[in-house]
Amino acid sequence: MNNNLAINATGLVKRFGDRRVVDGVDIAVPRGMIYGVLGPNGAGKTTTLRMLLGIIEPDEGSRTLLDRAIPREASDSVGYLPEERGLYPAMKAREAIAFMGALRGLDLKIGRKRADGLLENAGLGHAGDTKIRKLSKGMAQLVQLCGSVVHQPELLVLDEPFSGLDPVNQERLEALIRAERDRGATVLFSTHIMGHAERLCDRLAIIAGGKRRFEGTVAEARGMLPFKAHYVPHHEGDGLRALLPRDAEQSHDGWTFTMPDAGIEALLMQLIEAGYGISGLSIERPSLHDAFVRIVGRDALDAAA
């Protein structure tokens, strides 16, 4: 047992018929972190989360959740936002949040008081007495998220939480996730959107085809790829291409190529001496998307799109 881990899973396998939806996945989520499970649609993310929570049982492998071998024994210490959203449409927002807390053992009066603060922080302070059916989809989703954290769980699990939210509500959700981490909670969320993972995750796992393909930090994922240079010549000419690295690609505003192992200084001197000059030069870090494509493979990504 590792008290530093909120979740520890080894060799998780889940079959549906003849298909291995999850195929030997290991996940170790340190306490107090924002941990992302990143992968294309159909990668096995939701099934993995449901096994970690004990909603479904793995066919093979083991897992502990908050040091319990039976995950459901820790349910009062967990907040969960499933992929399928659902609130009672006739309930007012404040009551819906308090009710969700009561399901986890929280006193209703305390739940109502906390609900007001959570709604205010989510930019929905005006909506406490509004029935769910009168809220927009994005607002109702934020209300459900507030209900997932009202009992101040040790662990918050969010399945594709940004799906269907407009940019404003996405920012509010990101702020709420950071606030939960800052409170001391562990946050585990799944997504197929690179930007959220890049901004939020302390660590992440990349899953594709039911297998874990990578585990580490965003910087470590990016570090699997070399830096790129974007060069804009002062003058074009027939001999320019021959001086550039083999992988150089031309666009409307210059050339992009992998940074040479020995650095770019010698190449720049050659370009200047040959009369092509330099109108612009930038060194670009690979993005998480670039690393994701390298790890998962373009074919797998296109097949899941």
Image (cartoon, rainbow, N blue to C red):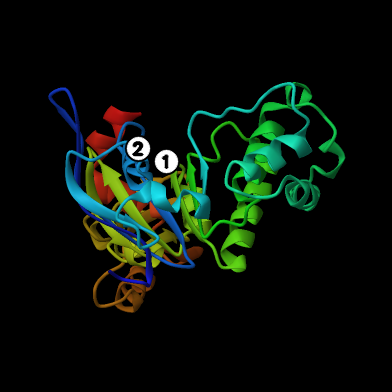
Q: Quadrant of the C terminus?
A: top left
Report whether residue 236 is seen: no
Image check: 11 left or right of 288? left
> Would you name the residue on which mark 2 appears?
40
| Residue at x-position 40% and y-position 51% | 73
- Seen from the viewer's position, the closer of residues 220 and 62 is 62
- Where in the figure is residue 155, as x and y percent of width and height? 49, 56
54, above or below 78, in the image: above
Q: Contact, CB < 8 Å: mark 1 with mark 2?
A: yes
Tag 2: amino acid? Pro
Report whether residue 76 is seen: yes
- Where in the figure is residue 64, as x and y percent of width and height? 31, 57
| Residue at x-position 63% and y-position 40% | 100
**SS class, disc 1:** loop
Image check: 230 left or right of 172? left
Q: Quadrant of residue 274?
A: bottom left
- Seen from the viewer's position, the closer of residues 43 and 252 is 43
> Would you name the residue on which mark 1 appears?
192
Q: Label 1 to label 2, Cα distance in Å?
A: 5 Å
Q: Quadrant of residue 55?
A: top left
Q: Quadrant of residue 45?
A: top left
Tag 1: amino acid? His
- Where in the figure is residue 72, as x and y percent of width and height? 40, 46
